[in-house]
Image: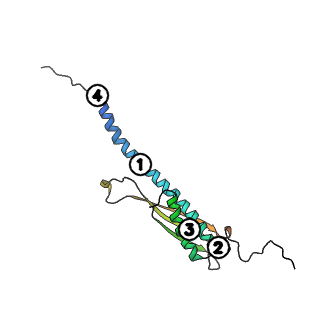
Amino acid sequence: MTTRRRDESGSALVELTWLAIILLVPLVWVVISVFEVQQGAFATSAAARAAGRAYALAPDDATGEARAQAVVRQVLADQGTPNQRARVSVTCDSPAGSCHTGTSVITVRVDSGVELPFFPAILGGGRASFSLDATHTVPIGQYVESAGEDSDEETDP
């Protein structure tokens, strides 16, 4: 009996192609997901800073709350994440009871999340998301002059 040797020419290319597909597809998904999360983190941080400034520059607390909400939506849209969900909460440490006095400290927290792109349905029932949050603290005196401070201008008698 004679044994015939099997010709394996060309099989290395096929094996390399399948190996590349099996390894590269998950690697590309991880890289894209990391970029999406990073973009969302930058957007959330910028939104918290802008909301703090908008709240501090508002004439009163109700207007400041509305402006902070609007600014967060606008900043997220400007950063390329218009559908990113966000929840804004503003707290105030003020001895006078109003957040718009000269010694108040405003803290704005933006809770947000990013959905991971191309999440395979086989790994879970719904879309996978990554939670993000950012906090920005603003001393009100940084943007608003206290009502009790004297002016530097001299007045004629």
Outermost top residue? 2
CA–CA distance in space, label 3 to label 4? 62 Å
Crowd around label 1: few <14 · some 14–19 · many ≥20 (10 Å): some
Disc on res. 30: 1
**Which sits earlier in the primary sequence, circle 2 or circle 4?**
4
> Which label sits on residue 108?
3
Residue 116, compared with residue 108, is above or below; it is: above
Which SS class for mark 1? Answer: helix
Q: In the image, what residue type sits under mark 1?
A: Val
First in sequence: mark 1 vs mark 2: 1
Q: Amino acid at mark 4?
A: Gly
Of the residues shown, which amino acid type is indicated by label 2?
Answer: Ser
Give the side of residue 152 with respect to residue 91, left or right: right
Is residue 149 shown left or right of residue 50? right
Q: Which residue in the structure is indicated by mark 2?
A: 104
Instruction: Tell me: residue 80, above or below residue 97.
Output: above
Amino acid found under the numbered disc labelled 3: Val
